[in-house]
Image: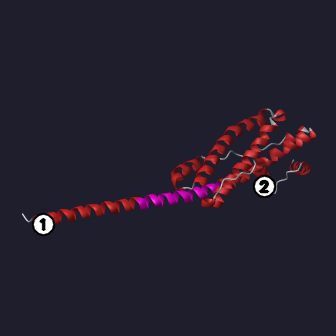
Amino acid sequence: MDWSSFIGGVVASLAGVGATLLLTKKMELMKAQALSDSSESSLYLELSDLTDDLGKTIDIYYTVFAQYRAYELSGNSDLLINITMPQATNFEILKSLTYQCFSGLTREQRGGLKKLITMSDSLNDLYPKVLDELRFNRESANIREINVLMSLLCSTYHLANELCNCEVRFKLSAKHPQEKLKEVFTSRSLPLEDFSIMEYVEKAT
């Protein structure tokens, strides 16, 4: 037997196997990267959709918020005759996409998304409580919960918008919820002062 030829054949075979393994590994990494990139793009798209949906929800719910503030100020229960609640926002797609691309995000993004998901759970807990109050206990509804829901909606909108627009540059905000509410109201041209709220309700009802 020609041992040199045999050994050369074995080495060549091993080299071929090694090259195949390296190529396979590289292809797997490329696929994983492509999937991660696709998931991140989908995540930002979902954050954009959520920001739009939450903005519309705030616009509709603001009327409820304003009606109850005007009712507090005037005691006029006629202001509560026509109450329209927006649909609850669905965060399930966001949760799934966050799980898919979590490891590829920055620490700040991961923290922001965890906070956003926690806030979405709080929204899903509070929303049906407020809805039941408005359906069955309108004049003695818990106004504090109505106000908390508005504050939570604005904070959730603010965070989703920041995550969407800043992407990898995102940093968690230290702003107080009331400050975020004021910013959101201003950006959506919603009155905050009592006098302006009364005027708004008079026109809307």
- What is the three-letter code of the residue carrying label 2? Glu
Q: What span is in magenta?
A: 29-49
Q: Residue at x 81, y 47 (%)?
A: 63
Q: Earlier in the sequence, mark 1 or mark 2?
A: 1
Is residue 113 visible in the rendered image? The answer is: yes
Q: Residue 48 sits in which quadrant? A: bottom right
Tell me the colour scheme of the image.
secondary structure
Q: Position of residue 46 (x, y in %)?
A: 61, 55
Q: Is residue 42 magenta?
A: yes
Residue position marked by numbered label 1 in the rendering: 4
Q: Nearer the viewer, residue 6 or 76?
A: 6
Which circle marks residue 183 in the picture? 2
- What is the three-letter code of the residue carrying label 1? Ser
Q: Position of residue 7 (x, y in %)?
A: 15, 63
Quadrant including the N terminus: bottom left
Q: Which residue reaches farthest front?
A: 4
Q: Residue at x 61, y 60 (%)?
A: 167
Q: Are marks 1 and 2 in contact (CB under 8 Å)?
A: no
Q: Residue 45 sits in which quadrant? A: bottom right
Q: Position of residue 179 (x, y in %)?
A: 78, 51
Q: Secondary structure at mark 2?
A: helix
State how many labels appear: 2
Q: Mark 2, residues whose alpha carbon is within 10 Å: few (<14), some, or many (≥20)?
A: some
Is residue 59 visible in the rendered image? The answer is: no
Q: Nearer the viewer, mark 1 or mark 2?
A: 1
Left or right relative to 85: residue 19: left
Q: Main secondary structure of the magenta part?
A: helix
Spatial distance from mark 1 to mark 2, Cα to Cα? 79 Å
Q: Residue at x 78, y 32 (%)?
A: 136
Left or right relative to 50: residue 67: right
Q: Is residue 77 magenta?
A: no
Q: Secondary structure at mark 1?
A: helix
